[in-house]
Image (spheres, grey):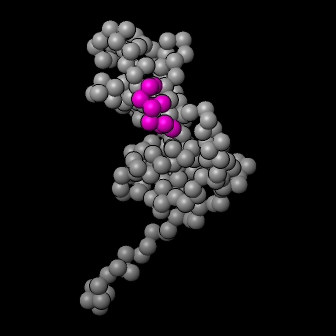
Amino acid sequence: MQLLSAVEAILFAAGSDGLQTSDIAHILDCSEADARNLCHQLRAAFNERGAGITLQEVADTWQLTTRPELAPFLKRMAQAPMQSSLSAAALEVLAIISYKQPITRAEIDEIRGVQSDRALATLVHRQLVREVGRQDAPGRPILFGTTEQFLRHFGLKSLSELPPLPPAPEEQDVSLFALPSEIARD
C-alpha cells in the first residue's frame, strides 16, 4: 500500500506534465513492469472508491486527471467569480509592486519592514503579479510585476491609469518632537 501512496504522491507533485513509466520506475527504484502494475492498481483503487480523480495513461505517460463525468462541476467552478477579498498584507504588497515594478521580494520586505512571502504567493496564485525577470545582482533575485489580470481586476487600461501617489512627507521640523523642557531652554 505504501508504494501506491508513493505513486499517487509523485504523480500529484508532477502536476499536469505527468510522469513516464520509466521515471516512476526510477523514482520508486523498481522495474518498469512493476511501475506500470502499480499505476494500474492505483487507477483501480480510484475507480473502486469512486474518487473524483482518475489516472490516465497517454503515450506511456501517467497523469492524475479529474473524472470526465465531473466536467459540469469544474465548468461551474471556473465560471464562479474568484474570491475577491485580499488580506491587508496582500493589498499592501500589491500596491508596492504596482508602483515600484519591477521589484524583488527583498525590496518589498524592506519597504514593508516585514516578510512578504505569503502575501506574494497569494498574489501570484491569483495571477495578479508574476515573475517578470531576474535582477542583475548576486543571487539573481526574481523581479515581480503586475499582470493583465491585475489591470482587468482593477478596471485599468494601463498602469498609467493608476492614481498618483500622495506626495512624500516633507522633512518634519525636529522641534516638533522636542520635549517641553528642551523648548524652554531655547
Residue that appears at 65% across and 60% down: 163
Q: Main secondary structure of the magenta part?
A: helix
User: Where is residue 121 shown, x and y percent of the image?
Assistant: 45, 45
The residue most toward the right is 157
Q: Which percent across, then down, holds residue 98?
A: 57, 50
In this view, the residue farthest toward the bottom is 184
Q: Which region shows up in magenta?
A: 43-52
Quadrant of residue 46 within the rendered picture: top left
Q: Position of residue 9 (x, y in %)?
A: 37, 30
The reply to whether residue 147 is visible in this rendering is: no
Query: Relative to residue 149, is residue 89 depicted above or below?
Result: below
Q: Nearer the viewer, residue 76 or 116?
A: 76
> Residue shown at 55%/47% (left/top)?
126
Direction front: furthest residue = 48
Q: Residue at x 66, y 55 (%)?
A: 154
Q: Identify the image quadrant of the N terminus.
A: top left
Does the magenta segment cover residue 49?
yes
